[in-house]
Structures are given as structure tokens and as C-alpha cells.
Amino acid sequence: MNIHEYQAKAMFRESGVSVQSGVHCTTVEQALTAYDSLGSDVVAVKSQIHAGGRGKGDLFCPESGELVMHGGVKVAFSRDEVENFASNILGQRLVTKQTGPSGKIVSNLYVESGCDIVHEYYLALLVDREEDSILVMASTEGGMDIEEVAETSPEAIHKAWFDPSDGLDEEVANSLGDSIGLSGPSRDSFAAMVASLASLFIEKDCSMIEINPLVRDGNESMVALDAKVSFDENAGFRHPWREDLRDLSEESDVEVRAHQHGLSYVDLEGNIGCLVNGAGLAMATMDVIKLYGGEPANFLDIGGGADSESITAAFGIILEDSRLEGILVNIFGGIIRCDMVARSIIEASEKTGLKIPLVVRFSGTNHEEGRKVLEESDLDVITVSTLGDAGEAIVNAIGGN
Amino acid sequence: MSIWINEETRVLVQGITGSQGTFHGTRMVEYGTDIVGGVTPGKGGQVVELPGRSVPVFDTMSEAISSTEAEASVIYVPARFAAPAIIEATDSFYELNGGGLIVCITEGIPTLDMVKVVSHLEKRPGVRLIGPNCPGIISPGSNGGCKIGIMPGYIHAKGRIGIISKSGTLTYEAVAQTMSVGEGQTTCVGIGGDPVNGTGFIECLEAFENDPDTDAVVMIGEIGGTAEEEAAAWSKENFSKPLVGFVAGATAPPGKRMGHAGAIISGGKGTAEEKFEAFEAAGIHIARDPSKIGEALVSALVEAGLRES
């Protein structure tokens, strides 16, 4: 789960991580009031969306498609500029390297006091799955894409690890500060910030905290000029307050609805809908479709506890896709019985008025019974028994590639 | 004959009085697993009826291990209680037996809980964790066998192939394909698809290398992380038996979590293509088509002179 920069900074402020004063706004009027209240000649007017690359992104008018402004993060030197930038951002479509070509409509703005920047750094905390530990990563190359830095100048990236049971050792934070060339008050300021972030990371069950850029200001203090925080969804039960931070407009509507039915769904570009039990088998099914010359329209794992209701919901969700030309159901029965799935498919097909080719592959628990149920029904369905046959059958059924 | 478990392995069920614990406890006994008891805090002294046997319920793992001489446990408790259950099992096995096997089926455990669990385990050598978020481990025997998990037992048969997989149903698919080419299994291990977990590919490969009854291994990976690449590099130096590999998710888009918490391509890392390349570089027989895992196994066996055709 991701949150906006303004929400992350509010959390930083509470945890003692230094940030500039700022105000969250949703209208141009609020942005102007914010400018007046901040009392800073220079302010940053920042688009709030859950994607990186905002500064280098482009804003387009959602109706006409015309370019409105380059850059989703602007520095304003006057009240007029604030008004101009805020109205060019709010309600427009921001396209960045990370949003994809469709971009995101900006409904939230953050107006923040300007900062006296001496140098820009990079700082991130994340779960390191190879080390089974929490990784703190710092770099002297602030403001740049960290993956690019890792490619071009890996020596600029410095790493340290800590165990959540022990917390972060002060020495470790200090030496990380040394390694990015900080000394004196700026090194102390850095170490204190890393310590606060480490506590925050553990307390709130984060999966990542990224500050890019982290800046050293004229007072030798370290300030988080940006803030990107994401949480581990699995730990949601410990943190009911997260629901208030959730911006549903940032999440794919269909993925949210699928989740409510216990389904795991990801929208893809193709025309063959997939309904599979198990994440690995669902990915393998997509791979087979592609290998036989087709294109999967989605990833859909119905999970181990699927029932008639969730399978009907799954069919409904797949069929919303107007590009859809065929459906492949691939079930390897374990706890789930194929005959139950067969009955659910018939019910769902009747309810949704299915008109496109349907290929069903059953294996495992009660696969013969399942196949029999389908073959004895009025449903127009192609049944197959192996994964390879399934891929071939669905691609042929929609008329090849 | 198998790795880590066999028909004699004495197994406890943590969460035995819950619906999942009782359901799978029953299935495991039906398969031939020696379930000797269970643990549910607050329900000690009760008895759970499983096919052909009544097993005692204990309040704690220590009592359960002392009374039943169990060597392994399987965890079916909800995600929020799973990490404490693993830690309790770890401490009890370590203190009482100097080691043991813990299989955690539970899905959705917070990642930081698992980071703590893994660091706890590292300090207690001899205790092995399989999972979480996995189907478990199974070793088919000549009559039944030992199944510690949730997989459908009947699709397996005793044989000479080892199977390691991050996935659940895709493991069953691989099993079905080895069966369709007339090969059974020594042991199948589902290591789970979470970013931080217990036993990894390399430990499984090492155990299969040392198992005289395993002639070849099928390894099923998926996108995310670099465990497959590391296993490939390790196998090149240390694994002498034929190895077949597949990686799910060649068509997965970057930045999207594909069901499993760990199955995500991030920062351009963890793609199926990189993993296939690492497999090829290590001389692993790859099946790019998941419907051809069985065929790839046959050609690997033939090439090694372990099968005629």
C-alpha cells in the first residue's frame, strides 16, 4: 500500500524526521492561502500522485489531451506563480515515467516552504529479501533515479543492515553518514534521522521508505525534501489507521473489487481472459498463452478458498474487459474440487450471458467429474486435460494470433 | 529414500483444533503421515479424532514434544499468530531435541515478523523452517507416505525425482507432468512465495545432492528476488545430478505484485528472462514452456544415461 508525499511527511514530522513546513491542498484557493500562511517567498508546488518521476512529468488536459505544463513539481517565487502552477496541475493528467502513458489525474497538491539546498543525497530503507534483513541505502547522488545510479556509479551507493528485533545501532548510522561524506552537525543530523526512520519503519510495518532527495541545508541540517512510504499489506491488521490514508482513486478499481472477493487480479494488455487457482500456476498459464501465440488479458488467482460466489465474481470481472475474445480456465484441484468449479462456471456463464469461446482445463481433485458436469451441460465449452492443450485450444478458438 | 522426512516422522499439528488444522490433519493421516498430537493454547487435555486414531491436544509445544517425541510440526494458525507459533516451535525443538522440522502453511504473515523469525532461526541451528505460504513437503512411500502440508497426496507416487518450488498449484502441475512421463518423486518441497522465508532452493538442492535415491531434480521458480540466480550459480559448482528448471512469470509486467507477496519485478530486477539465463549458464535443462517440464525432465535423464528414452 502506497501513500502520498503529504501523508508521509506528516508521519515524518510526528516521528521527528525533519521536513519543511507544508500544506495539503485540493483547490487553487487553498494553495494561495497556504502560500500566505507559510510566510516563505519561495515555495514548491507539488503534484501528489502515487508514482515517481513527478518533477520530470508532463501535465495534459484530460478532455483535449493538450499539453498544459512541463513538470509536475514547480518552484514558485510569487503568489501569482503559485496560482498559475496550482491551476495547471489540479484536475490535469500527469504522465511520468512510472505512470504509463495514461497518467494519473492530480486531485491533491502539496505547497511546501522553499529550502536552502547545499547538497542533495538519497536515502532509503527497505526489506532486503536476500539478506532477510532491513537495508538502509544512502547515496551522494541525490535527485537521481537510484536504479540509474546503481548502473552507472555503484560506488556512490552505501549500504547497512539492521535486524528489527535489535533496532538500528548508532554506530552503523554514524558510519553510513561518514561514508556519504558528512561530518560534524550534518553527520549527527543524518544519524538521528536514520534512527527515527528505522523506528518508524518497524513501528508502522513499512516495506519501503525512500527520500530522494534528502538535502543538507545551509544550517548543516538534513531535511527530507521528498518522502515515499509504502506499507506491508500483510501487516494491515496491526494498523487499522492506514485505511484513512488509503486513496482509492490511486488504486485500480477492478483490482480493488477483485480483492474484496478474495481474488488476486492484475489487468494486462491482451485479449484472452484467465481464471486460475494459485499465483504460480496463473503466471504459468499466462506464459503458455503467450508461447502459443496469444496475449493474456489478465492475471487472476482465485485463491485456495474460492467458492461459487467468488468464481461468479471472477467471471464478471474478467468479462468487463471489452477487448476480451476468449477465456481460459485452468484449475489444478487440491482442496478445490473441479466439479464445484464446473458448476460455478455454468452458473456464472448463464448469469453473465457468456458469448465468447471458453476453454476449461481441469486436473487434480475430481477432474473427471468436473469435465463430465461441463460436457453434460448446455454450455459451449472446450475441455482439455493438459496445460499445453489448454494454451493451444484457446489460441485456436479465438482464431489464432 | 527422501529428504528431511520419511514414513516414520512423528508430526504435531499447531492449530489442530481449528477447522484447517482438523481438516488437513485428517487428510495427512489418511495419506499415511504419523500425526502424534497437536497444540492449541487453552485446549490442552482435549483429544482430536483423526481417522483410526485419537490424538492428544497440548497447550504448548514443549509439552507436546516431551509427551509425543515429535520431530516435526505443521502450522495452520492464522497469519497474526503464525510468527509466535514458529518461534515457540523453534525454541521447543531446539531445547528439547537439538533440532526439528517446522512447516508453516499460513499465508499473509507480515514481512517484518518473518525477518524476526529468520534471525531467530539462524541462532538455533538444527531447526529447519519450510514456508510460510507454501503447500508443505511430501515424500511418497511404498504404501502411503509422509505428507506434511495441504497438497493432494494421491497425485504423487514414490520415485527418484526431487521437486522444489516457490508455488503451490504449479508444484502439483510439475508433479503431474513427471507422473505423465512415468517418473515418481523422492520428496517435493514447496518453499513458498514470500519475500522472506525459511528453507531456500540451495538447501533443498544440497539435501537432494546427498540423497542417494534422488536421481534428478525439478526446480520451479517465479519472478522476484534473485534466489533462482543464486541457486543456479551454486548448482554449477556443487550439484552433480540432472537439474530441470522453469520460472513462472515471463509475461508479468514490472511493478505489479502477481499474487504472491514476493512475485514482483522491481527496479528491473527479478525478471523471468534473467533467471532463465542464469539457469542456462549453469547448465540447467530449462523448460520455457511450463507444459513441457515433463519432456525436459526426460531429455535430462536420457542425456545423463539414467533413462533409455
Image (spheres, rainbow, N blue to C red):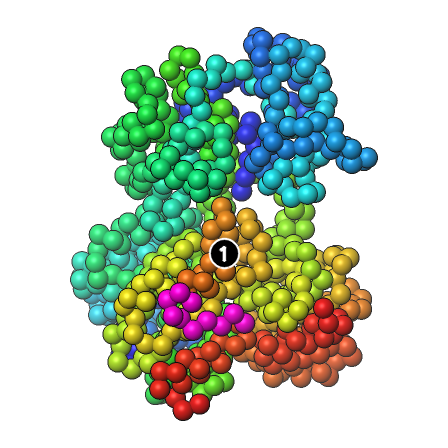
Query: Which residue shows up at 70% across the image and 31% down it?
Result: A59
- Residue at the front extreme, as displayed: A152
Q: Please state if B254 lies on the left or on the right of A30 as rendered.
A: left
Tell me where residue A194 appears, x and y as whole percent: 36, 29
Instruction: Name the quadrant containing residue A154.
Output: top left
Give the residue pinned by disc 1.
B271
User: Which is the main secondary structure of the residues drawn in magenta?
Assistant: loop
Magenta part of the protein: which range? B280-289
Q: Please state if A313 lies on the left or on the right of B202 as rendered.
A: right
> Does the stretch in magenta take in B185?
no
Query: Which residue shows up at 28% across the image and 62% down it?
Result: B128
The vertical placement of A164 against B243, above or below, is above
Tell me where residue B179 appears, x and y as whole percent: 46, 84
Location of the C terminus of chain B by quadrant is bottom left
Q: Amino acid at mark 1?
A: Thr
Tell me where residue A227 appears, x and y as whole percent: 50, 30
Instruction: Name the quadrant containing residue B73.
Output: bottom left
- Residue at the bottom extreme, as displayed: B308
Q: Please state if B112 lies on the left or on the right of A312 as rendered.
A: left
Instruction: Name the quadrant containing residue B82.
Output: bottom left
Which element type, helix, strand or loop, lies under badge 1? Answer: loop
Q: Please state if B44 lies on the left or on the right of A246 as rendered.
A: left
Tell me where residue B11 appears, x and y as whole percent: 30, 71
Location of the N terminus of chain B by quadrant is bottom left
Query: Which residue shows up at 37% across the image and 15% down it?
Result: A220
